[in-house]
């Protein structure tokens, strides 16, 4: 696999036949119109987390972004999530933990 690195207007672009992350995932094209529109529509405080998730290297950022988007970008709603059928429920961010170290929600 051959990579070509070019620099244009201060940004670095890597082109290759097949580019994957360390975990074997193909990163998303951050310049895709749907991704750009989603970044514009979301609160600025969560854009960096979403960008890291879309690069494919940060699973924690992916879970944070998914949960936040699910509840309309409201952090308190993620904390109060009761969707125990969601496969990400045990891993969701901002959980309330009781004194025994267990999740305080069902």
Image (cartoon, grey):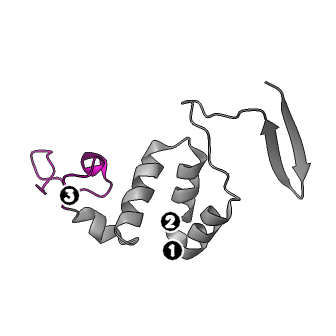
Residue bounds of the magenta highlight: 82-106
Q: Are marks 2 and 1 in contact (CB under 8 Å)?
A: yes
Q: Earlier in the sequence, mark 3 or mark 2?
A: 2
User: How would you rate the neighbour count of disc 2 (Cα within 10 Å): few for under 14, some for 14-19, many for 20 or more?
Assistant: some
Tell whether position 61 is magenta: no
Which element type, helix, strand or loop, lies under badge 3?
loop
Residue beneath label 1, please?
A: 43
Asked if 55 appears above or below 82 in the picture, the reply is above
Residue beneath label 3, please?
A: 96
- Mark 3 or 2: in front is 2
User: How would you rate the neighbour count of disc 1 (Cα within 10 Å): few for under 14, some for 14-19, many for 20 or more?
Assistant: few
User: How would you rate the neighbour count of disc 3 (Cα within 10 Å): few for under 14, some for 14-19, many for 20 or more?
Assistant: few
Asked if 68 appears above or below 40 in the picture, the reply is above
The answer to which quarter of the image holds residue 94 is bottom left
Q: Position of residue 85 (x, y in %)?
A: 20, 52
Q: Position of residue 34 (x, y in %)?
A: 61, 65
Q: Position of residue 49 (x, y in %)?
A: 52, 57
The answer to which quarter of the image holds residue 41 is bottom right
């Amino acid at each position: 696999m051959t990579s070509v690195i070019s620099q244009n207007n201060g940004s670095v672009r890597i082109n290759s036949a097949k580019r994957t992350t360390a975990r074997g995932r193909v990163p998303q094209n951050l310049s895709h119109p749907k991704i750009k529109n989603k970044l514009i529509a979301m609160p600025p405080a969560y854009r960096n987390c979403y960008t890291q998730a879309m690069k494919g290297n940060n699973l924690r950022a992916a879970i944070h972004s998914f949960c936040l988007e699910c509840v309309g970008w409201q952090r308190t709603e993620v904390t109060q999530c009761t969707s125990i059928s969601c496969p990400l429920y045990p891993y969701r961010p901002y959980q309330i933990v009781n004194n025994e170290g267990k999740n305080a929600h069902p």
